Amino acid sequence: MQSRVIIENVSPEIDGGRHFIKRIVGQPVNIQCVMLADGHEVLAGEISFKHEKEKNWKSSPIGLLQNDIWAGGFRVEKQGFYDYKIVGWVDAPLTWQHNIERKIKDNQHVNVELLDGLQYLTPLLKQVTKPEAKYLEKVIALFQSENDYKDAINEALSYQLESIFKTYPQKTFATTYDKKLRVYVDRQKAMFSSWYEFFPRSASKQIGKHGTFKDCEELMPRVAELGFDVVYFPPIHPIGIDHRKGKNNATTALPDDVGSPWAIGGTEGGHTDIHPQLGTLEDFKSLIKVAAEHNIELAMDYALQCSPNHPYVKKYPQWFKWRPDGTVQYAENPPKKYQDILPINFETEDWKNLWDELLSILMYWCNVGIKIFRVDNPHTKSFYFWEWAINEVKKKYPDTLFLAEAFTRPHVMHSLAKMGFSQSYTYYTWRNTKAELIQYMQEISNDIGNQYFRPNFWPNTPDINPYILQNGNQSLYMSRYFMAATLSSNYGMYGPVYEFIIHEPMQGKEEYYYSEKYEIKTWDWNYRNRMTDLIKRVNQIRKENPALQLTYNFINAPVQDEYIIAYLKQDESKTNNILCVVNMDPYNRRGANLQMPLSALGVPEGYPLLMHDLITGAKYIWTKEWNYVELSPELPFHLFRIERV
């Protein structure tokens, strides 16, 4: 009870320390808090931190910003959990030095005060280096001398003595913040990735033939050429027969209908088995290896649901909710109905065995070589299961990443992120106006969620053919892709539907007509167009510019036109500066004045800036705060790298 320091209003802190914040290797953890005490003594504090596998704590000082607000930080250097804590104390040595300085300036004689300081110097002799000990011995002698008063007060006020006090703090009666603070550190791909989704069964170049993993191997050079580093497959498991869906989501399937891959499980097996027409486990391992040779990782779909033919239905009937007529209610998300899918009952009394089994699926595929999972509808399963399962996987396979496919309410999406999901789908798909995009980017950049919620922007998915893209306008496809790839450091697209501008919808729905979810497609994988050229160039630019490898660095640049949006992105050191300008009008050439965020760039008006358009190669010199920009629908954006002249 002799501690006097109060520490409160710690930021970032997620739900009182219930959940951890997130970083990637090499990033800083910056912390602010309110720290105060009774009286007028000098306060000092530090952040103590250590990796979960380290025994010894390291420390980093915190400093006073203003009005009892203190700040500091540390940098994380390896994957896994770091624990950290905030410690504050009344610093008696610095208080003594501060008070004696005030008295000396007031021309008071401080012989007694010098002797009083010995209690702070003598204990340090056992802690300091030999040169520092020699210096302190000299100071102690001066403080005790009756003939060296002037030299004594000079040393009492010296920076050298102050530095020793700060280097070897005396933390008597220190206060430690009583909430558990942790940060989880992921590898870089958690923050920066480019996803490309395609159906492996549509990988064959022969019309009507079911694709195989060997066919997918032949497509890896194309994916690498476009610049993607993650290939995501819908489920690759056996597909059920009962209530199989036909083309266009028909409830009655024809004999040759292949069904939806998300109706997992059949006579050939379940979640740890492979659809026999795709190939064998050895074929899949070969594909993982070939993808890696092109710097691509495979992401698997982890969908916790079963077709009526899944082995679990007979082996573990207690994992499903049975109705009085002996059936299980199929999955629904009104108005959508999934008659071919049975939901798992997470309220089963046999929940422990259920959890263990579902975890074993993840462990199985991690052992095969998978490091990334796209999780289907995680918000319809137990949140506490995800917290446990993700933590268990990362204990053994720390490189594993989880993408939450959860287009749902904001608090639900954020709760999943708190439970451990590495990334999340977002509302970008439906943020279509300039005002909506600015508001959304400011929300995810400035809210506390930026400490744990990592967005992944997708302009389309197999489930979502957005209304805005249903007219097939090429300018819209270009601008929506461009903004996804430059607003967010993680983004993805469902292809080749997107780059081929396949847009025909189900009437009145955000769904594709003759959706690939229910049938095999044959694509001309050698086809190239303006979209493929653009994708290739933008992905290359993303890899070359650190400013585009972060999401929370969005700075709006005002433009005097409601259809032109502009934003600045800066890397951590603010040496890589990217200005993106987009014409969101797909039919008209538009021009307007743009206000450069000069304060963020740290330059005054009149300072010449070289605006290097990395798409076209054009270069311009801007010297004013307001500058004119003009864009046509044919190429509706600029991607400027701002360079000093």
Image (tube, helix red, strand yellow):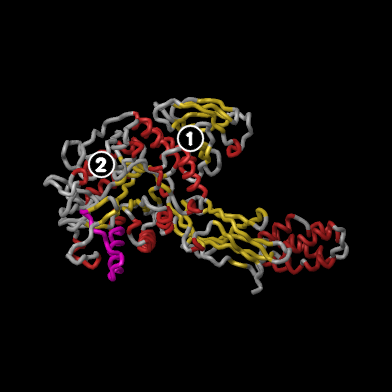
Q: Is residue 344 magenta?
A: yes
State which quarter of the image contains the C terminus.
top right
Residue 428's label in the rendered image is none
Q: Is residue 605 magenta?
A: no
Residue 26 seen in render: yes
Q: Position of residue 535 (x, y in %)?
A: 37, 34
Q: Position of residue 205 (x, y in %)?
A: 20, 36
Residue shown at the point (51%, 39%) measured from the top left: 569
* Magenta stretch in the rendered image: 339-363
Q: Amino acid at mark 1?
A: Ile
Q: Amino acid at mark 2?
A: Glu
Residue shown at the point (60%, 58%) measured from the top left: 33
Q: Residue furthest left?
A: 255
Q: Which residue is mark 1?
A: 565
| N-terminal label among 2 and 1 | 2
Residue shown at the point (32%, 54%) measured from the top left: 377
Residue 217's label in the rendered image is 2
Q: Nearer the viewer, mark 2 or mark 1?
A: 1
Residue 563 higher or lower than 69, as above or below: above
Dot 2 falls on a residue whose secondary structure is helix
Q: Is residue 139 left or right of residue 555?
A: right
Q: Residue 585 appears in which quarter of the rendering?
A: top left
